[in-house]
Image: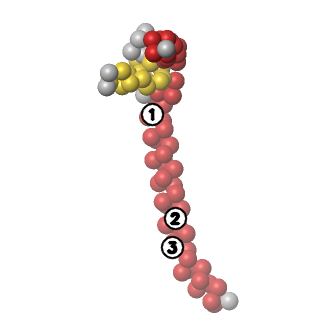
Amino acid sequence: MDQAIEKFFAWAPWVIFAFIILAAYLATRGSSSRTSSAQTFACAQCGKRGARQQMVSVEHEGAVGWYCAHCAAAQETEVSATSS
Ligand SMILES: [Zn+2]
């Protein structure tokens, strides 16, 4: 019985430590996702603003530009038309 209590107190600090690390990880992850979702990018083609998830990064002459889904599709068809 005493041995079981001894084992519990030997492990308890590590379990609490693990919970603190997990809580800190979840807190930082939650705040970072909140800031990234609030961040918006303007379309380089039509100027329409959208969330990062809705935008498509297009590399053009070494510079990365952000396009909305509509303009990115238009750019892709344009590139494939000129290359073929
Ligand atoms: Zn656009």
Using the image, determine if residue 82 lies above or below residue 56. Answer: above
- Compare residues 28 and 60 and report the one nearer the observer: 60
- The percent coordinates of residue 58 (x first, y second) are 42, 23
Using the image, determine if residue 10 lies above or below residue 33. Answer: below
Q: Kindly state the secondary structure of the residue where label 3 is placed.
A: helix
Q: Amino acid at mark 2?
A: Ala
Between the C-alphas of marks 1 and 3, the distance is 35 Å
Mark 1, other Cα within 10 Å: few <14 / some 14–19 / many ≥20? few
In which quadrant of the rendered image does the N terminus lie?
Answer: bottom right
Left or right of 26 on screen, residue 2: right
- Residue linked to disc 2: 18
Left or right of 73 on screen, residue 64: left
Q: Residue at x 50, y 43 (%)?
A: 30
Residue 48 visible? The answer is no
Q: Amino acid at mark 3?
A: Pro
Mark 2 or 1, closer to the camera: 1
- Residue linked to disc 3: 13
- Residue linked to disc 1: 36
Q: Residue at x 55, y 74 (%)?
A: 12
Q: Kindly state the secondary structure of the residue where label 1 is placed.
A: helix
Mark 1 or 3, closer to the camera: 1
Q: Amino acid at mark 1?
A: Ser
Using the image, determine if residue 5 lies above or below residue 68. Answer: below
Residue 13 visible? The answer is yes
Q: Residue at x 52, y 64 (%)?
A: 18
Of mark 2 and mark 1, the one earlier in the sequence is 2
- The percent coordinates of residue 37 (x first, y second) are 48, 31
